[in-house]
Structure formats: C-alpha cells, structure tokens
Image: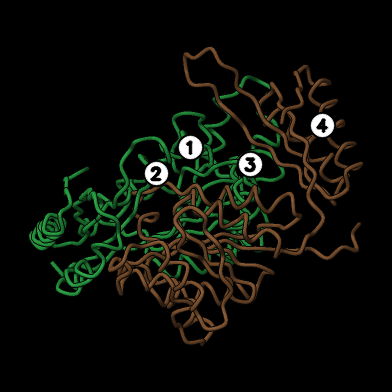
Chain colours: A green, B brown
Amino acid sequence: MCDVPRVTAAVLIIGDEILSGRTQDSNLAVIARFLAPMGIELMEARVVPDIESEIAAAVNLLRRKYDYLFTTGGIGPTHDDITADAVGAAFGIPVEHDHTAMAILAERYRPGEFNERRQRMARMPRGATLIRNRISTAPGFQIENVFVMAGVPKIMEVMLDDISPRLKRGVPLVSRNIRCSLPEGQIAEQLQAIQSAHPGLRIGSYPFFAPPGSGGASGTTLVVRGRDEAEVSTAADEVAELVKSLGGIATAVE
Amino acid sequence: MCDVPRVTAAVLIIGDEILSGRTQDSNLAVIARFLAPMGIELMEARVVPDIESEIAAAVNLLRRKYDYLFTTGGIGPTHDDITADAVGAAFGIPVEHDHTAMAILAERYRPGEFNERRQRMARMPRGATLIRNRISTAPGFQIENVFVMAGVPKIMEVMLDDISPRLKRGVPLVSRNIRCSLPEGQIAEQLQAIQSAHPGLRIGSYPFFAPPGSGGASGTTLVVRGRDEAEVSTAADEVAELVKSLGGIATAVE
C-alpha cells in the first residue's frame, strides 16, 4: 500500500470577512471531510484578505507545493470579488468572459437584468473549465490543479459535487477514535510508546473538558490514523487496552 | 489619524485535527474579534499539521512579516504536542523546563501525579514569558512577538485575557453594517462608485440566501470599514441611500 503515491491538497480561504471575525469559516472542515474519503490529504490551509497580490502569491505557492489547491470566496459580482483576476495574475493568463458561463448566466436573468457587473461572474482565466453551481448558477472554475469556488457554504458544497469526478484518488486514511475517561497526562507516556511502535500511524490526543458544574465528563479522545487498516486496528486495540490497564474506560466512537 | 502606525498580526493554527475535518476551528474568529477593538489588523491565518518543520517554517515567516503572531494548539503533554519544540527550533533557542511553570503545575497535581509527561507542559524556549491559564493551569508562553496558546477554545480565551495588556494598540477599524434587500448584482455598479470615491475605506458585500421554501429573505449585507469614523459614516449613508434609490430596503445592523 505504501507504493500508492500520496495525493495532497491545500485550501485557500479568501476574504476580509473571515479575518475580521465577522464570519466564522465552515468551508475548511467541509472540504477536509470531502477530501478524506478520496485519500486526498489536506496538508495546509491559509486565509488571506481581499488583496490581489496576497491572493496571487498564495495561489502560486500552494498550487506548486501540492497536487490540488481549492479556493473559496471572492467570485461574486461586486468590486471586492477579485479572485478571478488574482488567479489570472498568478498564472500569467488573461482573464476574459467565458462564453459558456455567459450563456448560463444570461439564461438566469430577466431581460435587462444581466448587467455588466453580473457579467463579471463569467470572467475567468482563459482556458479555465467551469465548476457548475446548481444553486445560484454562477459557476466557479478550474485552471490546471486550482479549483476556484464560491465562499457561500451551500454553493461551495454543490461545487464540490461537480469537482469530485475530476480528482485522482489516493489511499484513504483509516481512523479509529477512542473516547477515554482519563486525562491526557495519565496516559501520555505509554501512548508515546504505542506511537513509537507504529511509526507509520499518527496517533492524536485531544482532551475534552466538561463545563464546570455541568456534571459532564472530562477526558481525552484518542485518534489513530493511518493507511494500513490492520495496523490502525491493532494500534487502536492497544490504546484501548492501555486505557483499561490504567483504570480508565475506553469507548470506541465515530 | 493616518500617522498612527498600523499594527498587524497573523494566526497560526496547529493541528492535524483541523486539517482532517475532525474539529471545526473556532479560535480564529475569536482571536480576530479580540484583536479588532485594539486596532490590531489580522492579516493572515494558516493551518498547519503536527509536523515540526512545517510549524517552524510558518512561525519564522509570519513572525517576521507581522507585528504579532498568535499560535493555537500543540502545547499539551502528549507526543503530538510539539509546538514548544517547533517554536524553539524556529528561534534557534533551546527548549527547557521553565521554573515558574514547573512550580505552577506541581501545585496542581497530587503527589506522584506530576509525572515526566506532565512536566513537558512546562517546557518552553529559554527566556520565554508565561501566558497564564486560570482554567487548566498549564501555561502558554510568549517569546518576542510570538504568543503560543492552547488549542482548546475555553483555555485559549482566558490566555487572551492575559496577553491583552502586552499588546500595543493601533487605531481600531470602525465598521457599519447595512442589511440590504437587493441582490448583489443589482447594486454592484453603484457600490463600486462609492468604493472608488472612498479609497481609504474597504466596502465588503456579502450575499445571503434564504433556504428554499423557508419564506426567509435573501439579500446582501454591506459592510463599510475604515479608520476614519466620519468617512465610514458618510459612506454608509451613501450605501443606504443607494439601496433605497434602487427600490430596496436598507437596515442598519450590528
């Protein structure tokens, strides 16, 4: 299984509204969960403001470093929607009105409503391929290994459906989650030993705390991840045994 | 007001669990809303996996590019908590057990419980200053312009309280939000004109869509931001007038 090449990806979230705290991003987690079953590893994410040079620089760095780059935001009709221009600048490719995108958008609007600003939503770097959007029609686009999507979560999600068949697959990570009633510090030493015995796996340890006075439980969620299902299973069993041997309760969770 | 130097910041979110989609990050928005009233501009955010070289490279780039860098995650007692080592490596400073942190932690545990792994939570680059954590005791640390905080949201939030007095202030951005009943494409052209007339401001346009069949409203939230309160106010009034002149309803919102 180790002979299958890894497939990697990055996410670039574009928008002042995320950096100002006005909007809580939710697209990153959605993209991560979309990629995981395809065996595409999300290696990095960045959030940049609506500044063309910053967007272009990040696009160029990330598209070269990883197999795929997914961007969200900045493809609407207003002056702050500059992603198409930034991506065009990154590739050194002129940005123009795409004929198919123009036709799709023209059909959506009533006569006279398809104004110059709305036509901007059909602009993309020459040679780009459309990403369909069955919710609000305005398409995203793909150019080489870069997928440019809307920032509105529901629209981004349907764009992922359209992108899915275009992506090469890797070997999906298998993961087993164990909810443990003990604090991290009590299991850390032996957990390190299990990790050391399985260098091909990644074992994560995530404490959770009950709100004071809630009567809820505190403890640690332990996550064993890897490409070799049998080894993940073995290591997860070892983790569960460890918890029990220390007097804790281990529960397999989704 | 333009003579006041800008104060800038970046956020570095450390953790496989964010990139796998297991955990939805909420710390970025919290930090953004913490910085805004102090006039500290959050310019960029990155999410990196639990890989020391990746963390160190991002730390070095971001601490040099911005006035402040805030990191979250990776400071617990387990093997996957490698932020202190990564930050030490980034600065080229040895990482050791801090005496004060050791004393704070020793007090928290019962005799025999303060094991070697828990003592790891006192490790930080030599010369670092503690960031207090009144919830779970284990401190974060500051080294130069880098603030290393926990990933657990409640703990990160109390660490921000401790950091606040250490930060220099800029001129806060003033913002006015206008909820508009018209779609973006209908206001985009004249909105661009208002933006062009106020190059010192940033006008953002964010569409919202009612779920199909909900009977709810769709429209656009328009956000006018800038440092000059009078100009922000003027431009916001112009935006509201524009919406009304096009037959829409404009409502000031928080």
Amino acid type, mark 3: Arg
Q: Are marks 1 and 2 in contact (CB under 8 Å)?
A: yes
Using the numbered discs, state the Cα–Cα distance from disc 4 to disc 2 in whole angstroms.
Answer: 34 Å
Task: For the C terminus of chain A, give its image quadrant.
Answer: top left
Letter of the chain that mark 3 sits on in the rendering: A
Disc 3 secondary structure class: loop
Q: Given this view, does label 2 or label 3 mark the residue nearer the observer?
A: 3
Using the numbered discs, state the Cα–Cα distance from disc 4 to disc 3 in whole angstroms.
Answer: 19 Å
Task: For the N terminus of chain A, give its image quadrant.
Answer: bottom left
Disc 1 secondary structure class: helix
| Residue bearing the label numbered 2 | A30
Q: Given this view, does label 4 or label 2 mark the residue nearer the observer?
A: 2
Amino acid type, mark 2: Val
Amino acid type, mark 1: Pro
Give how far across and how far down residue B230 sits, in percent.
92, 41
Disc 4 secondary structure class: helix
Give how far across and how far down residue B189 sits, in percent.
77, 35
Using the numbered discs, state the Cα–Cα distance from disc 2 to disc 3 in whole angstroms.
Answer: 19 Å
